[in-house]
Image: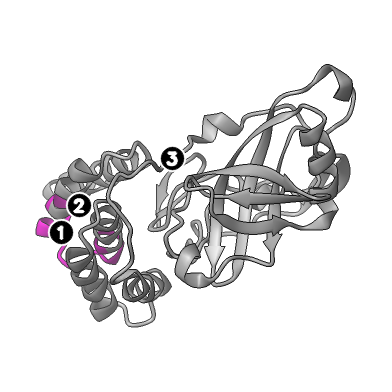
Amino acid sequence: MSEREEEKTGIWRQRIQDAIKLATNGEWQKAIETNEAILKVFPTDVDAYNRLGRAHMELGEYKKAKDAYSKALEISPNNLIAKKNLDRIALLKGSNVTVNEHRRKLSPKDFIAEVGRAGVVNLQDVAPRSLLVKLAPGEEVFLDTRSQDSIIKNFKNEYIGTIEPEHGLRLAKLHKGGNKYIAAAISIDGDKVKVMIREIHQDESQRGKLSFPIKMETLPAHVNDRLLRHSAGEEEGVEEGDYGEAEEAETVPEGFSIYEGYAAPDDIRVVGGFGGQE
């Protein structure tokens, strides 16, 4: 590789990292400009088109998002991110989604917690897809109780789904007992929804009770942090390579998979950290 080619590749890599960081920080207009700059030099970069589509979607610019995802699909006909987002855009047409309404995105650091105080849960009896499609990955959702169940609502107080009994019954008791929690949607794939939940306050009456009882699992020793597979576009994966043989047993919160750490929105993958480009 010539010196000029190496320089060009280095600039490209830096801009990719810049684009990922901007998306992670929710700086969508700057993310658009950065991905467009990448595409001027590398016009067949499918990942840049997917990131561009994501940024336009976040700004409510669905026509431009559709164009970007369509271009990605033209270059890579089997690209799942582009396909799923084009389907999502079709469902969003005519919906009452307002740009920057009162939605709030949560940061990965919001979910750093002691073992037993955070976990990922599945929802059941979920809302219709016409409502789920409006839910953005990383968006804050809210834990509530109904009878003995724990349910999740969006910022408009609309029902999203019921937490599976394995975790829901316990969380309902703790929540009624005075515990407080924060939560974010991390995976929306059709009618399959996953939510990350963290205990942020333990009532005196609940002292010593873990929100997510721990269990022992044998896990691969070498894994990349990953997150946010969702209906808006699953991660295509981290860089290829063996995870390696399982070398030791680690203690993790029940319902919390090491493969599902809190990561970036679709079109962004996690490679040894919060954000990485798919």
Res 39 label: 1
Q: Position of residue 120 (x, y in %)?
A: 68, 48
Q: Secondary structure at mark 2?
A: helix
Considering depth in this image, is 25 or 73 the residue closer to the camera?
25
Q: Secondary structure at mark 3?
A: loop
Of circles 2 and 3, the one toward us is 3
Alpha carbon distance from label 2 to label 3: 22 Å
Who comes first in sequence, dot 2 or dot 3? Answer: 2
Residue in view at x 29 percent, y 77 percent = 73
Instruction: Give the residue furthest to the front.
Output: 147
Q: Check the picture and name the quadrant holding the N terminus.
A: bottom left
Res 81 label: none
Q: Which residues are magenta?
A: 37-49
Q: Main secondary structure of the magenta part?
A: helix
The residue that label 2 is drawn on is 35
Q: Residues within 10 Å of mark 2 (few under 14, many from 20)?
A: many
Residue 144 as seen in the image, left or right of residue 44:
right
Locate residue 103: give its quadrant: top left
Considering depth in this image, is 234 or 178 the residue closer to the camera?
178
Of circles 1 and 3, the one toward us is 3
Give, as a three-letter code, the residue at label 2.
Asn
Residue 177 as seen in the image, left or right of residue 225:
right
Q: Is residue 101 highlighted in magenta?
A: no
